[in-house]
Amino acid sequence: MRIEESSPFMQVNAVAQRVRQLTLGAAPRVKTNSRRPTAIALMELHAGQIAVYDPSEAAALLADAVAAEGETDPEAIEAAQAIFGDEPGR
């Protein structure tokens, strides 16, 4: 989903998550002289460099990633599904 199409609530959450990533050492996705993670994340938001997924899109991407990795541990799969509120076995 394009960030412009998402709700303001989802945009704020996406920026907050990106701020955490930047704080932990992720490289900025835009050219900037700023060292403030919040300012950088907002610049990335306006540049379209932050992806936002609704829960169903995220669950589908997660299922694809789990299948690609060949994950067979039922506990790992269940934990991944719980992240998005998906019930196991659906």
Image (cartoon, rainbow, N blue to C red):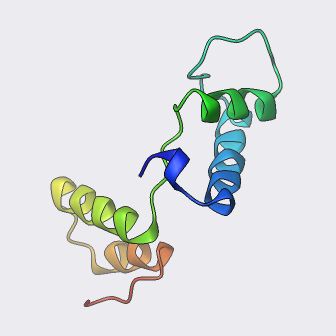
Name the foreground residue: 6 vs 51.
Answer: 6
Name the foreground residue: 37 vs 9.
Answer: 9
> Residue, x 52% and y 32% (percent of image)?
48
Vertical arrangement, residue 70 with respect to residue 78, above or below? above
Q: Quadrant of the C terminus?
A: bottom left
Vertical arrangement, residue 15 with respect to residue 57, above or below? above
Name the foreground residue: 1 vs 29.
Answer: 1
* Outermost residue, front side: 5
Is residue 19 shown left or right of residue 61? right
Is residue 31 shown left or right of residue 39? left
Name the foreground residue: 52 vs 18.
Answer: 52
Q: Where in the figure is residue 68, as x and y percent of width and height?
A: 17, 54
Vertical arrangement, residue 34 with respect to residue 74, above or below? above
> Residue, x 56% and y 22% (percent of image)?
29
Q: Where in the figure is residue 45, as x and y percent of width and height?
A: 62, 36
> Residue, x 50% and y 53% (percent of image)?
5
Q: Where in the figure is residue 70, as x and y percent of width and height?
A: 16, 60
